[in-house]
Image: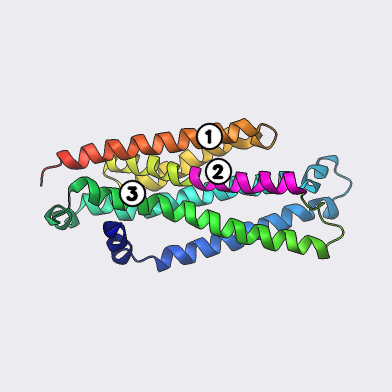
Amino acid sequence: MKLLTIECRRTRLKPYGRAVGVCGAVLLGFLYFFAAIPWLDPADPDSRLFADCGFLLHLVGLLALAAFTILGGVAGARIVVEAYGGRQVLLLFACPAPRGRVLGAKLWLTAALPAGGMLVTGLAGLGIFLLSLRFWPQGPAPLDTGGLAAALWGLAAGSLTAGGLSLWAVWVGFRLRSVPATVAAAAAIATLFCQILSPAWQLSWLRAAGLAAAVAGGAAAALSLRRQVERMEV
């Protein structure tokens, strides 16, 4: 915990905080835009899908998963890949703490930024949207208790998935010793996972499977990175 606190102080978190806020605002805008499609184009039969609040939240959740996975890749590129790829590695290895624990703090921070950012902005956006439906008679029907529980579960699962996938991208960037490769890997992985999870609106087990795969893959990536760091020679 002490190493994680030190890492938070060393890393300038304000730019990431601003990026999280921008992502949350843009995603909320997309949510209102999608919700207005049945009202803007009532003649289109496909627009009826957007009258379902559950479908809307799932769709925006996929966009959020992609956005925050890429944000996690950007953070990991700077916190991990850049740190171990330049002169800064000398300072890291001079630290009295074990190499594995120092890396662990960096990886925890890398995963926590997208997971926490998506969870906080998602809860705020969900609350604002559901509250505004009371003053929007033409909007989607409000969620019942089961729908709200499903939305909260989807948000929590998506947040953890974004954190796990960020570690996948860091592993790729670390292996290639490339910051751009880390960001590109995050974008590719996010796109692939969003395609896989697109039917999760109707297949609830698919979301749980995606979460399990992301977390297990993230844990495997962290263990692999730890072995690589412990074998590094300066």
Which one is earlier in the sequence, the residue at label 3 or at label 1? Answer: 3
Helix, strand or loop status at disc 3: helix
Residue at the image position 27 percent from the left and 40 percent from the top: 225
- Answer with left or right where residue 17 lies relative to residue 230: right
Residue at the image position 67 percent from the left and 46 percent from the top: 149
Which one is earlier in the sequence, the residue at label 1 or at label 2? Answer: 2
Check residue 107 in the rendering and tell me which mark sits there, or answer none.
3
Which one is earlier in the sequence, the residue at label 3 or at label 2? Answer: 3
Q: Say which quarter of the image contains residue 78.
A: bottom left
Helix, strand or loop status at disc 2: helix
The Cα–Cα distance between marks 1 and 2, rounded to whole angstroms, is 9 Å
Callout 2, which amino acid?
Answer: Ala
Marks 1/2 in contact by CB < 8 Å: the verdict is yes
Q: Does the magenta portion include 78?
A: no
Q: How is colour applied across the structure in the image?
A: rainbow
Q: Say which quarter of the image contains residue 182.
A: top left
Q: Is residue 175 above or below residue 56?
A: above
Q: Which residues are magenta?
A: 144-161
Asked whether residue 94 is in view, the answer is yes
Q: Main secondary structure of the magenta part?
A: helix
Callout 3, which amino acid?
Answer: Leu
Crowd rating for badge 1 (residues with CA inside 10 Å; few <14, some 14–19, many 20+): some
- Answer with left or right where residue 70 lies relative to residue 130: left
The residue identified by callout 1 is 210
Marks 3/2 in contact by CB < 8 Å: the verdict is no
